Image (spheres, rainbow, N blue to C red):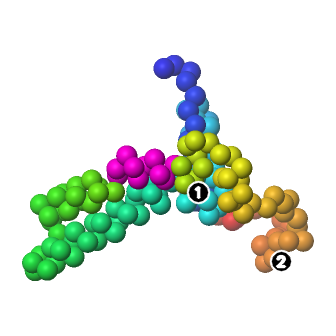
Amino acid sequence: MVGARRLLILNGHESHHSLEFQELCKESNIYTLCMPAHSSHLLQPLDVGCFSPMKRAYSREIKALMRYNINHITKLEFLPAFKAAFDRSFTSANICSAFRGAGLAPLQPDAVLLKLDVQLRTPTLAALPEALWEARTPSNVRELEA
């Protein structure tokens, strides 16, 4: 669709904060929304409700293979083990429970906001350590990025 806009929700990883990345998003009509730090367990319920159980289920599958002296996992062993773990974890009940527990479906904004430990503040120069602040014009790209 020509002229369509997209929303890209990001975690707080610093790689998403580069000028190059932001320019690419702007050129592509992509709006970025950065989640608050340490909030993915609340705002990405599948991390807790499905991926975490899948990790445990996959670990059990691999341990079962190890009992049969299979210590090197090839695609032939990986795919059935992964499929079994995925099928046990990504169930309709787990998915619905994860979104309900996070307060996202049905939407309960107060429940979500109460779980966040967000404290709005404006950084001041006094709050920066002396080593991070030097009042001078950068002379090269490395200094500019720093």
Instruction: Give the structural element (helix, strand or loop) at label 2.
Output: helix
Q: Which mark is residue 130?
A: 2
Q: Is residue 110 left or right of residue 128?
A: left
The relative height of residue 29 versus residue 61 in the rendered view (above or below) is above
Region of the chain picked out in magenta, as a range: 90-99
Main SS, magenta residues = helix
Residue 141 is at least partly visible in this image = no
Q: Identify residue type, mark 1.
A: Leu
* Label 1 crowd (10 A; few <14 / some 14-19 / many >=20): many
Mark in the foreground, 2 or 1:
1
Q: Is residue 47 left or right of residue 90?
A: right
Measuring 58% from the left and 41% from the top, which residue is drawn there? 106
Reply yes or no: does residue 117 show up in magenta. Answer: no
How far across and down, in percent of the image, does residue 141 sit?
Answer: 65, 59
Q: Which mark is residue 42?
A: 1
- Count all numbered tags in the image, as a single digit: 2
* Label 2 crowd (10 A; few <14 / some 14-19 / many >=20): few
Q: CA distance from mark 2 to mark 1?
A: 35 Å
How far across and down, in percent of the image, does residue 127 sit?
Answer: 85, 71
Q: Identify residue type, mark 2.
A: Glu
Residue that protrudes farthest toward the left in the picture: 68
Between 129 and 55, the one lying in front of the other is 55
Measuring 79% from the left and 61% from the top, which residue is drawn there? 119
Between 22 and 63, the one lying in front of the other is 63
Q: Earlier along the polypeptide chain: callout 2 or callout 1?
A: 1
How far across and down, in percent of the image, does residue 82 sit?
Answer: 24, 59
